[in-house]
Image (tube, coloured by chain):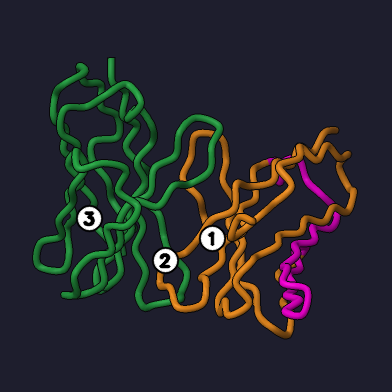
Chain colours: A orange, B green
Amino acid sequence: RKEVEQDPGPFNVPEGATVAFNCTYSNSASQSFFWYRQDCRKEPKLLMSVYSSGNEDGRFTAQLNRASQYISLLIRDSKLSDSATYLCVVYPGGSYIPTFGRGTSLIVHP
Amino acid sequence: GAGVSQSPSNKVTEKGKDVELRCDPISGHTALYWYRQSLGQGLEFLIYFQGNSAPDKSGLPSDRFSAERTGGSVSTLTIQRTQQEDSAVYLCASSSAVNTEAFFGQGTRLTVV
């Protein structure tokens, strides 16, 4: 089992839709979790941290489920500009090296 | 207030040549990472530096790859005797502390012909 797994998609949704991505991780001792966004031919950029209590930033909500070892990202009211690849990032327990998922591709169409 | 800076942005080299890629992290960031990303693929970890500790080289794919970090700041990734399979985007990231968010440079796109 890979350390961090994501559905590669693509998720093809109309503007205004709500879309959710999940990411599973294998190391139960993992401590820190993040979502990054990567546009085509660009570097990954931090979207948001994921806290145990969940967190929200505008249209974006991130949640952590330690029991089932997954994190989620919910995007409400999708915009064309949300089209990108969303990368799940986990610091496995005992490691200081962030492990990246392969990413989930989102395409928002008019 | 500059972010992570990498140079060059693009590098085309002939098979068998050596290349050096440079990364200038955010000032004060003690952790520095190198990753590479092949076309359509995920990020592959290469090497990790933390302060003055010995680097974690566990991700380097072969002994043709090496990296150093001078004075706890600028890092250079060197690839000797480049091969076509080395063609990828090489990304550098830094973070202020362990287990915190990492910030990426714009990457160096390496093409080996």
Magenta-tinted stretch: A59-83
Element at label 3: strand
Question: Label 3, label 1: how many angstroms apart (C-alpha)?
Answer: 19 Å
Residue A96, given in percent of the width and then of the height, sits at: 40, 72
Q: Mark 3 points at which residue?
A: B24
**Callout in the foreground (2, 3):** 2
* Closer to us: A52 or B85: B85
Spatial CA distance of label 2 from label 3 is: 19 Å
Magenta stretch: includes residue A15: no
- Badge 2, how many Cα within 10 Å: few under 14, some, many 20+? many
Instruction: Please tell me whether residue A81 belongs to the stretch shown in magenta.
Output: yes
Pointer 2 chain: A
Local crowd size for mark 3, using a 10 Å CA cut-off: few (<14), some (14–19), many (≥20): many
Among all residues in the image, which is located at the extreme front?
A1
Q: Position of residue A13 (x, y in %)?
A: 86, 40
- The residue to which callout 1 is attached is A46
Please tell me if label 2 and label 3 are on a single chain: no
Left or right of residue A18, residue B45 in this image: left
